[in-house]
Amino acid sequence: MKSKLFKNDELRMVNKNWRHIVITFIILNSSFIIQSCGVYSFTGTTLSPDIKTVTVNNFVLATAGGPANLPLTFNEKLKEYYQRYTNLKVVPANGDMVLEGNITGYDLVAVAPTATDQAGVNRLQITVLARFYNNKDETKNFEQPFSFYKDFPQNQTLSQNESRLVPIILDQIVLDIFNKTAADW
């Protein structure tokens, strides 16, 4: 019996040592891989290193409807996103990159018609026309509309859903603009 116990204890020690060796090997290899990938940016941006600043000029409301603070809210979200996800400094004028534009659409559309010719779903859609200037590389300049929508039930009003849906829609438009300007997607 003692010899069997001895073998089991010996096997446990070998297994334990083997696990330590494997774990150490994985950790060392991972650290080498991470070190060698030092050029990769986890923000996903493809910005040139000579771009240091961004200016976000006031987007203006160029459509009927929408909350009065919509342009201000959009501008602040855009500035905050660049500050949070890049190393760029947001400056009031003459940035290496400049964003400006208009909120051109704030539309409530009835979608998904039912058998009684009523909408089964209402859709709030916001469209922003963005103009982008890259003062370091003018080939990156563009003017493009960005749009996103969210649906809500037909039996609810826009005023019941506006405060919930507008931030979600604006967040997606900001992300789309950021991806086009900073991530080059």
Image: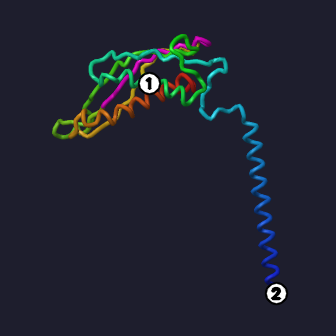
Rendered location of residue 22, percent (x, y): 77, 58
- Contact between labelled residues 1 and 2, with CB atoms less than 8 Å apart: no
Q: Which region shows up in magenta?
A: 124-138
Residue at the far left: name it.
116
The C terminus sits in image quarter = top right
Kind of residue at disc 2: Lys
Q: Which of the labelled discs sits on residue 4, or is there none?
A: none
| Side of 140 where 121 appears, left or right | left
Q: Which residue is drawn at 33% across and 28% down?
A: 125
Q: How crowded is mark 2: few (under 14 residues within 10 Å), some or many (20 or more)?
A: few
Q: Closest to the observer: 91 or 11? A: 91
**Position of 19 relative to 118 (above/below):** below
Kind of residue at disc 1: Glu
| Side of 172 where 184 appears, left or right | right
First in sequence, mark 2 or 1: give its number: 2
| Side of 45 where 170 appears, left or right | left
Rendered location of residue 66, percent (x, y): 29, 24
Rendered location of residue 84, percent (x, y): 54, 30
The N terminus sits in image quarter = bottom right
Q: Closest to the observer: 33 or 20? A: 20
Q: Does the magenta stretch include residue 183?
A: no
- Under circle 1, the secondary element is helix
- Name the residue carrying label 1: 76
The part of the image, by quadrant, that contains residue 45 is top right
- Name the residue carrying label 2: 2
The colour scheme of the drawn protein is rainbow
Rendered location of residue 93, percent (x, y): 52, 11
Q: Residue at x 33, y 21 (%)?
A: 105
Marks 2 and 1 sit apart, C-alpha to C-alpha, by: 75 Å
